Image (cartoon, helix red, strand yellow):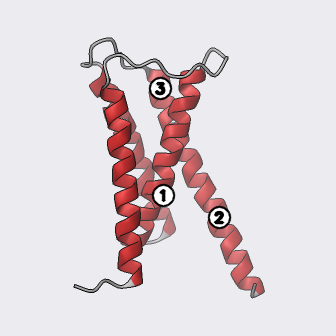
Amino acid sequence: MIFSDEHRKTIAWYITALLYTIILVFFTTLPQITPPDLGFTLSDKVLHFGAYLLFGLFWYKVFALGYKGGKASIYLILFVYGSLFGFLDEYHQYFVPNRRMEAGDIAADILGISVAIIIHKIIFKFQNRRKMKGL
């Protein structure tokens, strides 16, 4: 079976996003994990933010390559998907020994997804300006 370049790109991004998601779930399922100390009080929230920023960046590419709707629809799908995934990931930690569900972690997850969307909006706007100028 021969795949087009666009098909291969979509598959590669899907595999990347899926592997990242599996790794994320693996680490949140560990009963005893101590996150690295970044030297300030809310350092675990920064880690949640960064994890879901990457989650959003990877899954945006999957949605953008696989869905031919408008950008606003992709952003909405990503926001709902990422927020729901972050909530469910936190919820499942309630059942993991020595872990707990925290509203602050959910907020950091949603903020990470939101910033991923903003980054993509900025990149898209920059790319469109370059195309308009013929660069």
Q: Position of residue 125 (x, y in %)?
A: 67, 68
Q: What's the amino acid at mark 2?
A: Ile
- Report which residue position mark 3 lands on: 105
Work out whether mark 1 precedes mark 2 in sequence or the reverse, and give the earlier one. 1
Q: Residues within 10 Å of mark 1 (few under 14, many from 20)?
A: many
Depth check: give the residue in front, 87 or 33.
33
Residue contact between numbered discs 3 and 2, judged by CB atoms under 8 Å: no
Q: What residue do we see at 55% from left, 38% from top?
A: 50
Q: Can residue 68 be seen in this snapshot?
A: no
Query: Cα distance, mark 3 to mark 1?
Result: 21 Å
Residue contact between numbered discs 3 and 1, judged by CB atoms under 8 Å: no
Q: Secondary structure at mark 3?
A: helix
Work out whether mark 3 precedes mark 2 in sequence or the reverse, and give the earlier one. 3
- Report which residue position mark 1 lands on: 75
Q: What residue do we see at 31% from left, 18% from top?
A: 31
Quarter of the image where the N terminus is located: bottom left
| Label tally | 3
Q: Can residue 57 be seen in this snapshot?
A: yes
Dividing the picture into quadrants, the one containing residue 29 is top left
Would you place residue 18 above or below residue 52 in this image?
below
Work out whether mark 3 precedes mark 1 in sequence or the reverse, and give the earlier one. 1
Q: What residue do we see at 37% from left, 31% from top?
A: 27
Depth check: give the residue in front, 18 or 126.
18
Q: Position of residue 81 (x, y in %)?
A: 37, 48
Depth check: give the residue in front, 95 or 97.
97
Q: What's the amino acid at mark 1?
A: Tyr
Q: Position of residue 83 (x, y in %)?
A: 41, 41
Dividing the picture into quadrants, the one containing residue 84 is top left
Query: Cα distance, mark 1 to mark 2?
Result: 13 Å
Query: Cα distance, mark 3 to mark 2?
Result: 27 Å
Q: What's the amino acid at mark 3?
A: Asp
- Report which residue position mark 2 lands on: 123
